[in-house]
Image: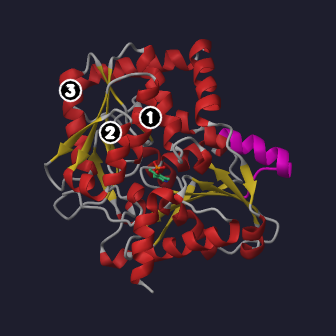
Amino acid sequence: MLNKKGYFGEFGGQFVPETLISALEKLERKYSELKKNKNFRRELDYYLKEYVGRPTPLYFAQSLSKKIGAKIYLKREDLCHTGAHKINNALGQILLARWMGKQRIIAETGAGQHGVAVATAAAMFDLPCEVYMGKEDIKRQSLNVFRMKLLGAKIIPVDSGSKTLKDACNEAIRDWVTNVRTTYYLIGSVVGPYPYPLIVRDFQSIIGREAKKQILRLEKRLPDYLIACVGGGSNSIGLFHPFFAQKKVKFIGVEAGGTGIKTGKHAATLIQGNLGILHGSKTYLLQDKDGQVKVAHSLAPGLDYPAVGPEHSYYKKIDRCRYFSVTDKEALKALKMLSQTEGIIPALESAHAFAYLEKMKFKKNEVVIVCLSGRGDKDMEIVKEEMTKSE
Ligand SMILES: *Cc1c(COP(=O)(O)O)cnc(C)c1O
């Protein structure tokens, strides 16, 4: 499905300044070498087990199953070290950077979740780490800014454009162009120029590989549905990809509907976007009539991105995955519902997947796996404020 030039169908590619093409080629070459290297794989497995805490459970949610009327399993990425799936990728790429002999890590972050995961892994391996972050996001996410600093990372405020994630990405790319020999640019989702969408997918596919083994042991068969929220698209691709060839397993991606699709304040890129180029990749984007990238909106900080990984654009095109959206309000309601039926407070992002679960009609014995991408602790301030407002 991935052709030689780094496209998923017509999506993806490498739309970057000339100076970065050879860096991307080197990255691709080194990565495909290391993928087959026993020592690299042993090291990755070791840290995933001992540091991240894998494998994460595939938990049969008994009360939720009764309520929904199907057999619901939760893939517990919320139990990973740092509380979400992002560490799977941050750790994998930090190891890659070390094997490539890079001495400095840079990253971009929006809500700060990816920044925290990178700062965590960089601290463990004693690598200097600089994180680009929009000034607006720094204001909104002060706790994650504090976390990153505590972990020893340096925050570089970005004052251009809308002062959010897309501007931080631009600045990080600019830094990389200047310091490409010594610096590794650690991208946080299945986005950016090839080979990043492939590398991040591989590191997140541990989610789906484990889930497949676990469900075959528990149910003696493959699931009917996989459901996950889609921001950049990494927890969903990570769960989906190992099931790609099993056409009977249906994929459902849930995007952020914000205050409602009609209000224009949302992040439903695959449902509402059209084809364009952002951050080095050709994919679906939210843009206005003149091709200007729009500001995305979601109450869930990690879904607030105006583009989506190119492989999702491809899944949409070939109809391998179906995409839906749920609103901020519906996600909040689902967060409360899961907290009270299972005693698990999900991240606002993951709550989107559960909100869609409530809208679906299942046959009684259908088996469903939902990716619980992260835990809700980080969102308690937002949730508290919203719930007090509506009381
Ligand atoms: C960042 C984040 C997401 C969205 O990112 P994807 O790349 O789409 O997975 C989802 N859930 C949590 C908990 C996150 O932190």
376 left or right, relative to 58: left
Q: Is residue 253 magenta?
A: no
Q: Which residue is mark 2?
A: 149
Q: Nearer the viewer, mark 1 or mark 3?
A: 1
- Where is residue 218 shown, x and y percent of the image? 84, 49
- Where is residue 100 shown, x and y percent of the image? 40, 15
Task: Find numbered disc 1 in the image and state the secondary structure of the residue it sits on.
Answer: helix
Q: Which residue is mark 3?
A: 177
For the rendered model, the colour scheme is secondary structure
Task: Find numbered disc 3 in the image and state the secondary structure of the residue it sits on.
Answer: helix
Amino acid type for the residue under numbered disc 1 = Thr
Amino acid type for the residue under numbered disc 2 = Lys
Residue at the spot x=51%, y=43% of the render?
A: 82
What number is the disc on residue 205?
Answer: none
Between the C-alphas of marks 2 and 3, the distance is 25 Å
Q: Where, by quadrant of the figure, is residue 266 drawn?
A: bottom left
Q: Nearer the viewer, mark 2 or mark 3?
A: 2
Q: Are marks 2 and 3 in contact (CB under 8 Å)?
A: no
Residue at the spot x=48%, y=22% of the render?
A: 95
Is residue 1 visible in the rendered structure shown here? Answer: no
What span is in magenta? 209-224
In the image, 373 versus 246, the foreground residue is 373
In the image, 345 versus 308, the foreground residue is 345
- Where is residue 92 shown, x and y percent of the image? 50, 29
Look at the magenta stretch and give its main secondary structure. Answer: helix
- Where is residue 383 shown, x and y percent of the image? 45, 70
Q: Which residue is mark 1?
A: 120
Amino acid type for the residue under numbered disc 3 = Val
With respect to residue 4, does 112 lie above or below? below
Task: Find numbered disc 2 in the image and state the secondary structure of the residue it sits on.
Answer: helix
